[in-house]
Image (spheres, rainbow, N blue to C red):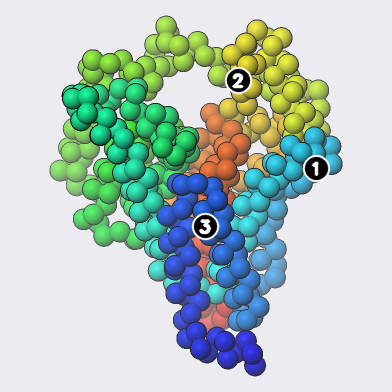
């Protein structure tokens, strides 16, 4: 009776309103300090648990177990690492990876109750507002400095105002912010969250942000998404405009007085470029050497870094040794840290997520999962909190969308929820 009275006082749709507000906050907080989004995630999980306790939803236990398997597989290697890795390092890795379990679980609990599109749109609007605010704050010192020093507009495309220098106010990694922008571009183009007349303008603004971030993988995925949308639209004026913008941007990069962007974006075509000489991919060999020493369970967190840096030294990679570089490939990172067991758990979780998305024909989720895989080929995504939370969000939305799809199908079949 007590809980019923509380719910009646809050109103019939109290949980919908609460969920919308928390989703707005979650989206808005993702680009900023880790603590903000962590607090919001905890609030979302608390709300999901409250709904589960108070409203007692009907659900298929078999289906729910299937969904829970994905986040469990993602976090299982971190738990196993506590038993054979360096305990302090293993604990830090586990704590950083908690969103992989918390966020999908929260979305599943919410998804058992909600089928309101407002919840999904709130997350999108919050994330878009967060990126806009993030960009404006990053641009502020750039613009004020250019005005004070009377610098020409072309300085915007020089190293001092791009990439890590651009995100310096938040000490944020451009590649990870780029992933969040890709999520927004995919949702803008391929969902019904935005009216068609606004889509191209929103994406154009987001493309400018990616350009300032110089997030290479994100830019590549963004151009692919734009190409798909433009071809699918069959609008000649849009196709001409897209080609013109692409040619204009390429010309701006190639003919700009500074070679920074040309070196950064087209480095693979320039044999004398420092980034080619950087040997990021050849350094994967050091991680494979660590894997060969402990192939089944891996050496565990902490020990893997010591073995990898020692191998760097033996290979003559002094920069990698001094800066303690990670594998720069999430799959190889798991393989060298947690062995075949850990890497298999990780890959299986991703395959299950792909399977759900394809089966439900949630092509936006397929695109986002594919973008994640591309990013993880050149970045150890889960070595940073924002990377963990982005993967958690994509997995959470895969599960959420599957639940909503299942509820809609069951209602159409007349079998209830």
Question: Of helix, strand and loop, which one carries label 1?
Answer: helix
Q: Give the mark nearest the N terminus, 3 or 2.
A: 2
Secondary-structure class at tag 3: helix
Mark nearest the camera among 2 and 1 is 2
272 up-or-down from 156: above or below? above
Q: Position of residue 166 (x, y in %)?
A: 37, 32
In the figure, 223 relative to 45: above or below?
above
Disc 1 to disc 3, how far (Cα)?
Answer: 29 Å
Residue 397 — which label?
3
**Residue lying at 47% horizontally and 75% vertically, measured from the top left:** 16
For label 2, the residue is 323
Q: Name the mark nearer the viewer: 1 or 3.
A: 1
Q: Are marks 3 and 2 in contact (CB under 8 Å)?
A: no
Nearest the viewer among 277 and 373 is 277
Crowd rating for badge 3 (residues with CA inside 10 Å; few <14, some 14–19, many 20+): many
Secondary structure beneath label 2: helix
| 69 to 91, vertically: above or below | below
Which residue appears at 74% of the width and 37% of the height? 89
| Marks 2 and 1, how far apart at CA | 25 Å
- Which residue is under mark 1? 82
The first of marks 2 and 1 along the sequence is: 1
């Amino acid at each position: 009776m007590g809980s019923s009275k509380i719910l009646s006082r809050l109103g019939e749709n109290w949980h919908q309103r609460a969920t919308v507000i928390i989703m707005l906050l979650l989206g808005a907080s993702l680009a900023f300090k880790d603590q903000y989004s962590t607090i919001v995630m905890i609030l979302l999980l608390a709300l999901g648990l409250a709904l589960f306790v108070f409203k007692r939803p009907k659900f298929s236990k078999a289906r729910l177990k299937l969904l829970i398997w994905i986040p469990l597989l993602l976090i299982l290697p971190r738990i196993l690492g506590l038993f054979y890795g360096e305990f302090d390092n293993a604990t830090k890795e586990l704590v950083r990876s908690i969103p992989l379990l918390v966020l999908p679980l929260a979305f599943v609990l919410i998804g058992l109750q909600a089928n309101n599109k407002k919840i999904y749109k709130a997350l999108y609007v919050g994330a878009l507002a967060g990126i806009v605010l993030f960009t404006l704050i990053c641009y502020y010192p750039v613009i004020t400095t250019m005005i004070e020093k009377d610098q020409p507009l072309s300085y915007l495309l020089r190293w001092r105002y791009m990439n890590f220098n651009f995100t310096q106010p938040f000490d944020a990694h451009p590649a990870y912010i780029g992933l969040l922008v890709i999520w927004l571009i995919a949702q803008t183009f391929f969902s019904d969250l935005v009216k068609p007349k606004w889509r191209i303008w929103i994406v154009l603004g987001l493309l400018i942000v990616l350009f300032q971030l110089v997030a290479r993988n994100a830019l590549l995925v963004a151009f692919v998404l734009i190409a798909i949308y433009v071809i699918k639209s069959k609008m000649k004026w849009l196709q001409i405009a897209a080609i013109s913008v692409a040619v204009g941007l390429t010309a701006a990069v190639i003919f700009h007085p500074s070679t920074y962007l040309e070196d950064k974006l087209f480095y693979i075509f320039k044999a004398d470029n420092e980034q080619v000489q950087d040997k990021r991919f050849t350094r994967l060999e050091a991680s494979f050497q660590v894997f060969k020493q402990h192939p089944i369970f891996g050496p565990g967190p902490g020990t893997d870094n010591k073995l990898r840096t020692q191998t760097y030294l033996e290979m003559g990679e002094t920069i990698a040794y001094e800066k303690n570089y990670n594998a720069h490939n999430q799959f190889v990172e798991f393989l060298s840290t947690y062995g075949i067991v850990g890497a298999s758990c990780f890959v299986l979780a991703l395959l299950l997520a792909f399977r759900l998305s394809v089966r439900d024909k949630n092509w936006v989720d397929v695109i986002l999962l594919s973008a994640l895989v591309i990013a993880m080929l050149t970045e150890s995504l889960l070595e940073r909190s924002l990377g963990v939370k982005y993967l958690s969000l994509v997995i959470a939305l895969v599960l959420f969308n599957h639940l909503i799809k299942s509820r809609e199908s069951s209602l159409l079949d007349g079998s209830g929820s």
